[in-house]
Image (spheres, rainbow, N blue to C red):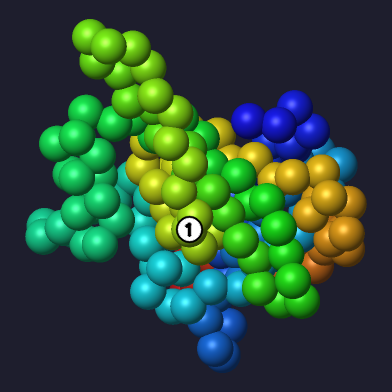
């Protein structure tokens, strides 16, 4: 892993007309990426610690990793071109011959789900982080609105 990465966490997942907005960030900044509805739901389920009775695609990947005795080490959102982001899933495989590190190209949305499932870090390259506009004010406004909506529902 390059040393010039920033560790981020999922700050929120908000449904939109065409999918979900996933807010990622650290103490300094929040930014968002858009994902399709099924992956947005999988991210929300991972955050809540919820699993379906039958395996979803990400669960299948977990099972394959388990069968191969590969461990997810971390994920990196390493590039963006316009509104398209790119990521790498970093796996570590050890056996009697030694340790092998494998990087796999992946969508950031899938990478995030796997990192959450495995409780592993989500990193963003410095170049991607620096080019993203800070959306913390939008995130706080949306979270406040959700809290207000929940409070009104509880009062009913």
- 38 left or right of 149 in image: left
Identity of the residue furthest to the left in this view: 54
- 79 left or right of 73 in image: right
- 114 left or right of 58 in image: right
Q: Report crowding for label 1: few under 14, some 14 to 19, many 20 or more residues within 10 A (C-alpha).
A: some
x, y percent for residue 139: 74, 62
x, y percent for residue 98: 33, 12
Q: Residue at x 42, y 53 (%)?
A: 113
Residue 150 versus residue 52: which sits nearer the camera?
A: 52
Query: Is 140 situated above or below 20?
Result: above
Count of marks overlaid on the render: 1
Q: What element carries label 1?
A: strand
Q: Which residue is drawn at 82% across and 44% down?
A: 126
Residue 63 versus residue 40: which sits nearer the camera?
A: 63
Q: Residue at x 66, y 59 (%)?
A: 23
Residue 107 versus residue 133: which sits nearer the camera?
A: 107
Residue 118 occupies which quadrant of the picture?
top left
| Quadrant into which the N terminus falls | top right
> In the rendered image, is residue 151 in sight?
no
x, y percent for residue 105: 49, 55
Query: Is 101 situated above or below 99?
Result: below
x, y percent for residue 6: 75, 37
Query: Is 151 situated above or below 156?
Result: above
- 96 left or right of 91 in image: left
**Residue at the spot of label 1:** 106
> In the rendered image, is residue 83 in sight?
yes
Q: Residue at x 43, y 36 (%)?
A: 102
Identity of the residue furthest to the bottom in this view: 17
Query: Is 127 situated above or below 94?
Result: below
């Amino acid at each position: 892993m390059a040393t010039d990465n920033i560790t981020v966490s999922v700050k929120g997942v908000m449904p939109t007309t065409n999918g979900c907005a996933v807010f990622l960030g650290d103490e300094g900044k929040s930014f968002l990426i858009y994902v399709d509805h099924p992956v947005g739901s999988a991210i929300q389920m991972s955050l809540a610690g919820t699993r379906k009775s039958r395996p979803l695609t990400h669960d299948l990947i977990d099972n394959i990793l388990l069968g191969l005795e590969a461990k997810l080490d971390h994920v990196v959102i390493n590039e963006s071109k316009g509104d398209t982001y790119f990521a790498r899933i970093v796996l570590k495989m050890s056996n009697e011959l030694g340790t092998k590190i494998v990087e796999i190209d992946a969508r950031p949305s899938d990478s995030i789900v796997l990192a959450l499932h495995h409780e592993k870090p989500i990193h963003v390259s410095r170049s991607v982080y620096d080019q993203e506009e800070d959306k913390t004010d939008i995130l706080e406004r949306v979270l406040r609105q959700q809290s207000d909506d929940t409070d009104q529902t509880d009062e009913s």
